[in-house]
Image (cartoon, helix red, strand yellow):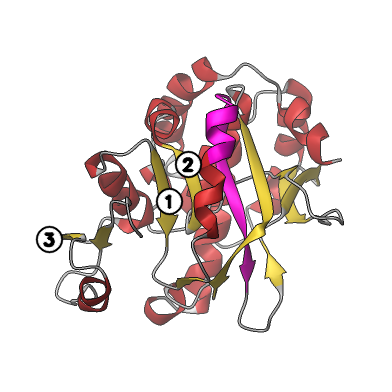
Amino acid sequence: MTGCEVIVMNDYPGEDITKPVQQIFADSIVVNNKKNLGFAGNVNQGVLKSTRDYIFLMNSDVVLKDNSFLKALQFFKKDKKLFAVGFAQIEKDGKIVGANRAYFKNGLINHSSQIVPNPYSLIPIFWAEGGSSIFNKKLFINLGLLDELYNPFYWEDIDLSYRAWKAGYKILFDPNIKVEHHHESTIGKYFDKSKILKTAFRNQMIFHWKNLTDKDLIFKHLLNIPKFIFIPGFFDALIRLPKILQVRKKTVKLFKKTDKEILSLFS
């Protein structure tokens, strides 16, 4: 980790999870939040506290295999429009994920995995995962950071990445850089499954109401609203609509591309 600035953000007041990191890297900067800020709030505080040009966001359930992540820095230096680089993530069952795509269906932008070309090469991805990707810090801040509307978790990294795409920047996936990532192992300790599913759908609604700008896609989304109201989390999103629309006014001012232009990258 020579040359790196390590900031440990502890978002669990009263529970010290920082000692293992300090033992490995004594010069790490530790911030113990006095109250829980949620994923977005916690990450934003760490980003603003950092002093370097690039941010490597790494969840507590991510394990570095080696220092190959440093190779990503050369991509940023070559391309000033590059917002983030995502990595291949090895799950507990050995499956490799991280190469994601998006498509519009049944009134929603959905996401799934995409095939990585062989031989391995850089490919565009829909979003850079907030627990195992490197970001251009200046763009991260200029785009407005992670939106705390999504607290406590889910869709905040998709939202920021989508704003980056629509503002004219790009996100790439490097399959040659690998980390171990046991998804949901942290969230699952503190929230039950019903709460996780409810929050995920609530935030999916927030994402659409905040970011969709193509009139035909908005119309298709609205046509599907009647069936959405029966899904847990919909009304939690609806009561936040005034705040969502307030944030939307600022957000869309940065957009240079349409929804279909972005989605066409993954068709």
Q: Amino acid at mark 2?
A: Phe
Q: Amino acid at mark 3?
A: Lys
Q: Nearer the viewer, residue 166 or 252?
A: 166
Q: Nearer the viewer, mark 3 or mark 2?
A: 2
Question: Which residue matches tag 1?
Answer: 56
The x, y position of residue 263, in whole percent, is: 77, 35
Q: Nearer the viewer, residue 16 or 154?
A: 16
Question: Which residue matches tag 2?
Answer: 135
Earlier sequence position, callout 1 versus callout 2: 1
Q: Quadrant of the C terminus?
A: top right
Examine the rendered structure and indicate whether residue 138 appears above or below residue 85: above
- What residue do we see at 79% from left, 25% from top? 216
**Residues in magenta, as a range:** 74-90
| Left or right placement of residue 111 versus residue 136 in this view | right
Q: Residues within 10 Å of mark 1 (few under 14, many from 20)?
A: many
Residue 90 visible here: yes
Earlier sequence position, callout 3 versus callout 2: 3
- Numbered circle sitting on residue 34: 3
- Numbered circle sitting on residue 17: none
Q: Residues within 10 Å of mark 3 (few under 14, many from 20)?
A: few
- What residue do we see at 38% from left, 58% from top? 152
Q: Amino acid at mark 1?
A: Phe
Secondary structure at badge 3 equals loop
Q: Nearer the viewer, residue 175 or 162?
A: 175
Q: CA distance from mark 1 to mark 3?
A: 24 Å
